[in-house]
Image (cartoon, rainbow, N blue to C red):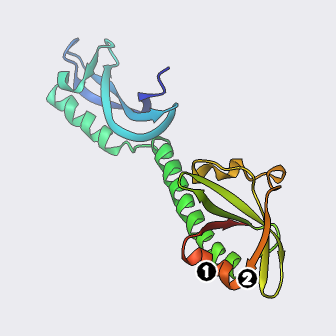
């Protein structure tokens, strides 16, 4: 299935008068139509890739691409093309992609700020991510916080990719070892990358 390619759309048409037609040789009016071409993915326009125009004699209906036009008609064509603006819709995909990237950067930066707060003030049900072996990751869930200590229950499952750790973060999996450490050691574990991240 083809999900990307190029398409065109009609942008603007304008009638110009007093130009001789190469076909019928009448001094008549011509309709110049400008079309915009754009690249799309899944039918969503990503970015424009140029404009193209044709003319139609309103007397004999002969049509011409620019290379076939008389010099007078070329000048009229170029003027209409220059005044025809590329529509916003031909950029909509690029704007969406740019917006998603900007949101991703914002969310990542915001999460980093949140993690600093989560580490300094842990709460029950915080989920701590860590590397459980050379090729696997797992989580701990905070069950209790006191003035100087923090207590966890371990996740009984592991997963090979940190980006997919959310797949094992389920209540039914927190049935393994329970233990506690001092709050000082908890904070130090993030400094030396024993603990990798925390979600709330």
Please indicate, yes or no, whether residue 88 appears anywhere in the rendered image: no
Among the two numbered marks 1 and 2 on one chain, the one whose residue lies closer to the N terminus: 2
Viewer-side residue, 138 vs 25: 138
Quarter of the image holding residue 198?
bottom right
Apparent side of residue 27 relative to residue 165 in the rendered image (left or right): left
Does dot 1 land on a helix, a strand or a loop? helix
Q: Image point 76% across, 68% down: which residue? A: 126
Give residue 26's position: percent from left, percent from top.
Answer: 23, 17
Q: Is residue 67 above or below residue 39?
A: above
Quarter of the image holding residue 114?
bottom right
The disc label shown at residue 188, or none: 1
Mark 2 neighbour density, 10 Å: few (under 14) some (14–19) many (20 or more): some
Apparent side of residue 23 relative to residue 45 in the rendered image (left or right): left
As drawn, which residue projects farthest toward the bottom? 147
The reply to whether dot 1 and dot 2 touch (C-beta < 8 Å) is no
The CA distance from mark 1 to mark 2 is 10 Å
Mark 1 neighbour density, 10 Å: few (under 14) some (14–19) many (20 or more): some
Q: Quadrant of the C terminus?
A: bottom right
Give residue 171's position: percent from left, percent from top.
Answer: 83, 53
Does dot 2 land on a helix, a strand or a loop? strand
Viewer-side residue, 45 vs 21: 45
Quarter of the image holding residue 146?
bottom right
Apparent side of residue 137 relative to residue 35 in the rendered image (left or right): right
Q: Which residue is mark 2?
A: 182
Q: Is residue 60 above or below residue 152?
A: above
Q: Is residue 97 above or below residue 122?
A: above
As drawn, which residue projects farthest toward the left? 71
The disc label shown at residue 104, or none: none
Please indicate, yes or no, whether residue 125 appears anywhere in the rendered image: yes
């Amino acid at each position: 299935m083809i999900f990307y390619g190029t398409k065109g759309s009609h942008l603007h048409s304008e009638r110009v008068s007093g130009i001789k037609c190469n076909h019928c040789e009448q001094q008549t009016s011509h309709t110049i139509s400008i079309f915009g071409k754009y690249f799309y993915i899944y039918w969503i326009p990503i970015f424009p890739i140029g404009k193209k125009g044709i003319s139609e004699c309103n007397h004999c209906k002969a049509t011409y691409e620019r290379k076939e036009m008389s010099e007078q008609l070329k000048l009229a064509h170029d003027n209409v093309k220059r005044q025809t603006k590329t529509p916003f819709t031909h950029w909509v995909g690029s704007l969406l992609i740019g917006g998603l990237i900007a949101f991703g950067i914002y969310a990542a930066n915001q999460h980093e700020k949140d993690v600093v707060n989560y580490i300094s003030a842990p709460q029950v049900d915080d989920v701590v991510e860590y590397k459980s072996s050379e090729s696997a990751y797992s989580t701990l869930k905070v069950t209790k916080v006191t003035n100087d200590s923090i207590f966890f229950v371990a996740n009984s499952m592991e997963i090979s990719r940190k980006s997919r750790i959310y797949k094992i973060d389920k209540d039914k999996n927190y049935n393994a070892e329970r233990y506690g450490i001092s709050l000082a050691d908890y904070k130090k574990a993030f400094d030396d990358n024993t603990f990798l991240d925390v979600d709330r």
